Amino acid sequence: METLVPKQKGTIMNPNKALWEKGDFTEIAALMRQSGEALVNSLGIVTPLRVLDLGCGDGRIVTLAVGSVYFDRDPDGKDVKHHSSFRAKRGVGVDIDPDRLKDCEATLQKNGFSNIKAEKDGRGIKTLTATLKTKNGEVPVEYRRGDALKVKDLNDANVVLLYMLPEFMRKLEPQARKMKKGTRIVAHDYPFPDWK
């Protein structure tokens, strides 16, 4: 059930959209903590799936999808260790906000990734790569700063994760319809408006 909050007299809106519109991405990331792990659990991600997270925020979904341990804080401020049983072959995250790429770097450092490399430009981190060492070898992850509507390798993914507003979903829908058969597209909160 969706919780709605007043926007203006006579209209209502989703509380996440209200946060998004005021630019409070940190609070949105905090709201995703609980649902992020549940989302990955619902996918049953196993090798050889390749996961692409558009609007990846702090990168936690990508790290969980490839099988990392994830440390988080509970409501009382205590550290909690989460275990991911998933083993995607590759994880990629894309976010347009340069500050989110800094958050992704912190997520990688905190959760056992190695060979962390950041390519920077005048706006901050442009791309970020790392590997997770597992008993079956190394799993690569990559984060990119960029427009999620202009992702060139969208069709390389087996699973595409979205946490975007309706306006974005409307713009992405034509590209999503061209994706290869069998690709799983998981949208949190907002569906494609004309998807049947």
Image (cartoon, rainbow, N blue to C red):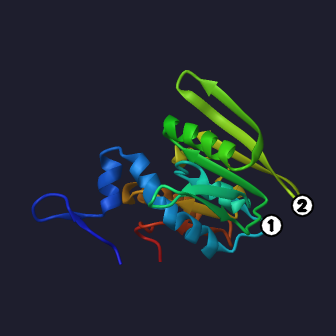
Q: Seen from this angle, which residue lies furthest top?
A: 122
Q: Is residue 97 left or right of residue 181?
A: left
Q: Position of residue 56 (x, y in %)?
A: 55, 51
Q: Which residue is mark 1?
A: 47
Give the spatial CA distance, label 1 vs label 2. 11 Å
- Amino acid of disc 1: Thr
Total marks shown come to 2
Instruction: Give whichever of 32, 80 is nearer the camera.
Output: 80
Query: What secondary structure is found at the residue carrying circle 2?
Result: loop
The answer, for residue 146, to whether it is visible in the render is: no
**Is residue 40 shown above or below 105?**
below
Instruction: Give whichever of 68, 43 is nearer the camera.
Output: 68
For the residues labelled 1 and 2, say whether their Cβ atoms are less than 8 Å apart.
yes
Q: Quadrant of residue 128?
A: top right
**Is residue 191 shown above or below 100?**
below
Q: Position of residue 165 (x, y in %)?
A: 39, 57
Name the residue rendered at 63%, 26% in the picture: 120
Instruction: Give whichever of 73, 121 is nearer the camera.
Output: 73
- Amino acid of disc 2: Asn
Q: Seen from this angle, which residue lies furthest right?
A: 136
The N terminus appears in which quarter of the rendering? Answer: bottom left
The answer, for residue 40, to whether it is visible in the render is: yes
Closer to the eye: label 1 or 2: 2
Name the residue rendered at 62%, 55% in the picture: 71
Name the residue rendered at 41%, 54% in the picture: 28
Image mark for residue 136: 2
Q: Position of residue 105 (x, y in %)?
A: 63, 40
| First along the sequence among labels 1 and 2 | 1
Q: Quadrant of residue 65?
A: bottom right
Q: Position of residue 3 (x, y in %)?
A: 30, 71
Graded by Cα atoms within 10 Å as few (under 14), some (14 to 19) or many (20 or more), the crowding at tag 2 reads few
